[in-house]
Amino acid sequence: MFSKLTKVLMTAALALTVALPGLAFAGPAEWPTTLKLGFIPTEGAADSAKRAKPIAAELEKDLGVKVEIFTASDYNGIITAMANSHIDLAYFGPKSYVEAAEKANAEAVVMELNKDGQPGYTGIIITKKDSGITDMDKAQGKTFAFTDPNSTSGYLVPNVIFARDMKIDPEKYFQEVRFSGSHGASILAVKNGSIQVAATNNIDMDRMIEKGAASLDDFNIIKRSDMIPGAPIAVRKDLPESLKVAIAGSLLKIDDDPEALEILQNGGYRHTSDKDYDMVRYLKRLKAELAKKK
C-alpha cells in the first residue's frame, strides 16, 4: 500500500510530467525539514494565524515535514519575508502576489475558491446601514479607509474605480483617507462609526459575519467591482520542483476536508499559474497611467 506522501507525489508528479516532460525531480531527501508558511493579515495577524492552521496541518501530514506559521503586521512584511527566504510559501492576495512575484521570486501554485466554487471574489465599498450614505455621491466629503497599499480589493481595485469610472481623486473627494491595516479592521471601523466609507471584499465580509463580528444588516454596499482572481498560495521558485508539486497536491486535498474548509472560510483550492494574475498586472498599469492624467 502506498503512503500518503507517495500518493501525493505520484499524483502531482504525473501532472507535472505531462506539463514539463523530461523534468528531473529532487526527492524528499532534498527537502528542508521545516517549511515556513506566511499569511497576509487580511483580518489581523491573530485571525490569519488561526486560518493558516489547517493548511499547516495538511502539509505536515502529507509531506512529513514540520510547518511553522509566520504572520506580519502588514502585507509587505510577508513579501519581504519571502524575498529574504525567511518563508517558503505564503497566502497572498492577488496584488500582493504580483508584487511578490516581481520582488520575492514567488510562484503561484493554487488559487483560493469562494464558497460557491468560483475562482474569484468581488471588491465592495461599504458604509454603515443607518449613515444615510447609500451611494457614492453621498460618500463625498466623508472619511474613507483603504486596507493596505498591497491589497487588491482594499486598494488597487477601488483606485481604478475612482480614477477610471468616477473620474475622482480620493484624496480630494473624501474628507480624509486612511489605511486600516486589514479588511477586518475596515469592516469593524465602518460598523462602529470610526470610518464612514471603506473598501473591502465579499469574502472577508463573509468571514467577519461567520465569526459573529458583523452582520450584513450593519452595512450598505454602495459599489461592487468585477470579479477579481482568487487569492493564491505561492511558493519560492527556488524550492525543489518535487517539493513545489507535492505542496500543490497536498493543498488540493483540503477540498475534501469540511472541517478545514470551515476554518479557512473558503471553497477550497484549484491549480493556478502566474499568468492567471496578468489581469492584476493590467490593473496596476492602468492605475499608474490614470494617475499620470490627474
Image: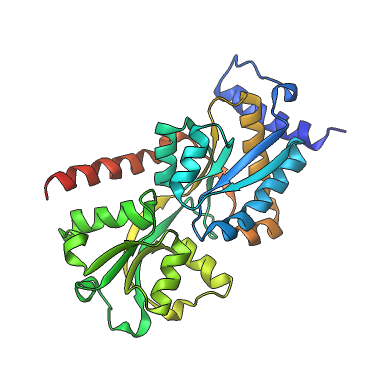
Q: Nearer the viewer, residue 245 or 78?
A: 78
- On the image, the x and y values in percent for residue 154 come to 37, 57
- On the image, the x and y values in percent for residue 189 come to 41, 72
Q: Nearer the viewer, residue 160 or 142?
A: 142
- Going 59% across and 52% down the picture, which residue do you hit? 268
- Is 28 located above or below residue 196 in the figure? above
**Number of numbered discs on residues:** 0
- Going 55% across and 60% down the picture, which residue do you hit? 115
Say whether residue 127 is left or right of residue 241.
left
Residue 171 lies in quadrant: bottom left
- Going 21% across and 67% down the picture, which residue do you hit? 174
Residue 68 visible in the shown view: yes
Q: Nearer the viewer, residue 190 or 262?
A: 190
Say whether residue 133 is left or right of residue 244.
left
- On the image, the x and y values in percent for residue 121 come to 44, 56
Residue furthest bottom in the image: 130
Q: Nearer the viewer, residue 104 or 160?
A: 104
- Going 59% across and 59% down the picture, which residue do you hit? 46
- On the image, the x and y values in percent for residue 241 come to 61, 24
For the N terminus, give its image quadrant. Answer: top right
- Is 237 located above or below residue 187 in the figure? above
